[in-house]
């Protein structure tokens, strides 16, 4: 059974190929920009080779993408879910800010529950 984190290299390669073609680049041109050979680029695009993290980072940087964008179909959905999750909302908050947010959420929940009964 595949887990949510399994990476399908053929799909990753297809996403990279689509980005390259959208930008009107050949494999040689793209490889030069990412500092890899056109042959290696071809292997990555076809899903026959797993690149290193640093290579994927160079590829995503040149396209203005994130790793999520090339590894997952629903990268936008994942980012939105993370941003609106409790952890995402509390990210970067101080302990006192987290306490205020928690108290506000509990108060809001009580109001919603009261109104649900009406």
Image (tube, helix red, strand yellow):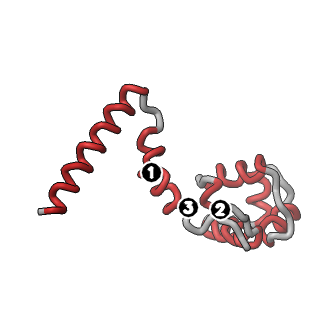
In this rendering, would 91 be left or right of 75?
A: left
Q: Mark 1 vs mark 3: give the one in front.
A: 1
Residue tagged 2:
70
Quick one: SS at disc 2?
helix
Name the spot of residue 89 as percent of width and height, x first: 41, 43
The quarter of the image holding the C terminus is bottom left
Q: Residue at x 86, y 64 (%)?
A: 49
Q: Residues within 10 Å of mark 3 (few under 14, many from 20)?
A: some
Q: Mark 3 vs mark 2: give the one in front.
A: 3
Q: Quadrant of residue 9?
A: bottom right
Residue tagged 3:
75
Disc marking residue 85:
1
Q: Residues within 10 Å of mark 2 (few under 14, many from 20)?
A: many
The quarter of the image holding the N terminus is bottom right
Of callouts 3 and 2, which one flags the residue occurring earlier in the amino acid sequence?
A: 2
Q: Residues within 10 Å of mark 1 (few under 14, many from 20)?
A: few
Q: Compared with residue 24, is residue 113 higher up or lower down, i.e. above or below?
A: above
Q: Quadrant of residue 14?
A: bottom right
Name the spot of residue 113 as percent of width and height, x first: 22, 56
Disc marking residue 29:
none
Q: Are marks 3 and 2 in contact (CB under 8 Å)?
A: no
Q: Compared with residue 6, is residue 57 higher up or lower down, i.e. above or below?
A: above
Of callouts 2 and 1, which one flags the residue occurring earlier in the amino acid sequence?
A: 2
Question: Disc 3 versus disc 2: distance between alpha carbons?
Answer: 8 Å
Question: Disc 2 versus disc 1: distance between alpha carbons?
Answer: 22 Å
Q: Mark 2 vs mark 1: give the one in front.
A: 1
Q: Residue at x 42, y 27 (%)?
A: 95
Question: Disc 1 versus disc 3: distance between alpha carbons?
Answer: 15 Å
């Amino acid at each position: 059974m595949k887990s949510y984190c399994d990476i399908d290299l053929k799909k990753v390669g297809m996403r990279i190929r689509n980005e390259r073609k959208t930008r009107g680049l050949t494999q040689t041109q793209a490889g030069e920009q990412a500092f890899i050979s056109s042959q290696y680029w071809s292997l990555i695009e076809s899903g026959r080779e797993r690149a290193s993290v640093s290579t994927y980072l160079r590829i995503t940087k040149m396209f203005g993408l994130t790793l999520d964008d090339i590894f997952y179909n629903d990268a936008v959905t994942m980012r939105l879910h993370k941003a609106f999750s409790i952890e995402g909302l509390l990210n970067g908050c101080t302990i006192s800010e987290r306490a205020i947010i928690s108290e506000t959420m509990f108060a809001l929940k009580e109001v919603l529950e009261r109104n649900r009964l009406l």
